[in-house]
């Protein structure tokens, strides 16, 4: 029996389960709770969710992740693969969960990590303009709660990330922020239009990986009063030396 813990605006927002040998109970608290939990990364939280069976009888967990800027219950939807351990306890693996993963349509890899890393984190940024305290470097801080805003909303606005070294880019994710949008519900005709330079197309996942150093976003149109982007995330692989593997790591889980 699955339940959703309260607290959308907190990073401990998650889901848990009670377990039983019978649908009628009695139920007991699962020892590995919460089964869906994400306290750090680009976006926090993994609560108010539902677990479903998808292609190939694979279990998936859909949940809410907190933005909590315009209102405290502002959220986005996340999707994690579900697993069962040797004791038949249900759990999700949220490690690198807001990095690219394979979709359910990819046989034998569904839900697995692509191993494309975030190569834009804390890199050097230049922009056409910025408004008030919402500076360009906010788009590379890996935090959905901060954002860059331009002085004007027109096709003269751009932002450029210097990866500092050559890297192979596999995917680009643009996370727009709804700064003072005053748009509620489903509104017909809304769209975003932009151009990515140094990469030959504007798909989130590139048809062919590109070896580049600079990535520039050029605005064409957004439906909101101001152009506002929380993060421009570049996924791929760097060409530097691989870090040394950690040895003798011990993880201690404390009781509540």
Image (cartoon, grey):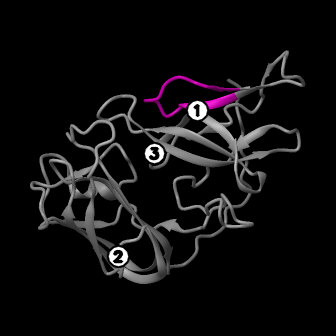
Residue 5 x %, y %: 58, 24
Foreground mark, 1 or 2? 1
- Is disc 3 placed on a helix, strand or loop? loop
Q: Magenta segment: does it hold 102? A: no
Range of residues picked out in magenta: 2-16
Q: What's the CA distance linking mark 1 and mark 2?
A: 37 Å
Q: Quadrant of residue 126?
A: bottom left
Q: Work out whether mark 2 precedes mark 3 in sequence or the reverse, and give the earlier one.
A: 3
Q: What's the CA distance linking mark 1 and mark 3?
A: 13 Å
In the rendered image, the vertical position of residue 131 relative to residue 127, given as above or below: above
Q: Main secondary structure of the magenta part?
A: loop
Is 5 left, or right, of 86 in this rendering?
left
Q: Quadrant of the C terminus?
A: top right
* Residue 43: mark in rendering: 3
* Residue 14: mark in rendering: 1
> Contact, CB < 8 Å: mark 2 with mark 3?
no
> Contact, CB < 8 Å: mark 1 with mark 3?
no
Q: Magenta segment: does it hold 4? A: yes
Q: Which residue is mark 2?
A: 164
Residue lying at 58% horizontally and 70% vertically, measured from the top left: 243
Count the numbered circles shown: 3
* Residue 88: mark in rendering: none
> Contact, CB < 8 Å: mark 1 with mark 2?
no
Q: Nearer the viewer, residue 222 or 162?
A: 222
Foreground mark, 2 or 3? 3
Is 57 left, or right, of 256 in this rendering?
right
Q: Nearer the viewer, residue 54 or 47?
A: 54
């Amino acid at each position: 029996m699955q339940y959703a813990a309260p607290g959308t605006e907190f990073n401990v927002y998650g889901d848990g389960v009670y377990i039983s040998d019978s649908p009628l109970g009695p139920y007991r608290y699962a020892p590995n709770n919460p089964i869906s939990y994400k306290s750090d990364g680009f976006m926090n939280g993994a609560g108010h969710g539902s677990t479903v069976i998808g292609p190939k009888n694979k279990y998936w967990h859909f949940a809410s992740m907190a933005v909590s800027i315009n209102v405290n219950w502002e959220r986005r939807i996340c999707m994690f693969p579900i697993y069962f351990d040797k004791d038949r306890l249900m759990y999700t693996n949220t490690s690198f969960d807001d990095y690219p993963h394979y979709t359910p349509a990819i046989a034998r890899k569904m839900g697995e990590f692509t191993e494309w890393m975030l190569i834009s984190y804390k890199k050097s940024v230049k922009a056409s303009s910025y408004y008030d305290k919402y500076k360009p470097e906010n788009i590379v801080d890996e935090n959905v709660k901060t954002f860059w805003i331009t002085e004007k909303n027109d096709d003269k606005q751009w932002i450029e990330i210097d990866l500092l070294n050559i890297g192979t880019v596999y995917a680009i994710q643009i996370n727009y922020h709804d700064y003072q949008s005053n748009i509620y519900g489903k509104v017909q005709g809304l769209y975003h239009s932009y151009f990515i330079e140094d990469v030959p197309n504007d798909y989130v996942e590139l048809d062919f990986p590109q070896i580049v150093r600079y990535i520039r976003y050029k605005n064409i149109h957004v439906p909101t009063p101001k152009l506002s982007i929380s993060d421009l995330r570049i996924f791929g692989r760097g060409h530097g030396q691989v870090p040394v593997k950690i040895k003798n790591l011990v993880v201690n889980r404390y009781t509540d």
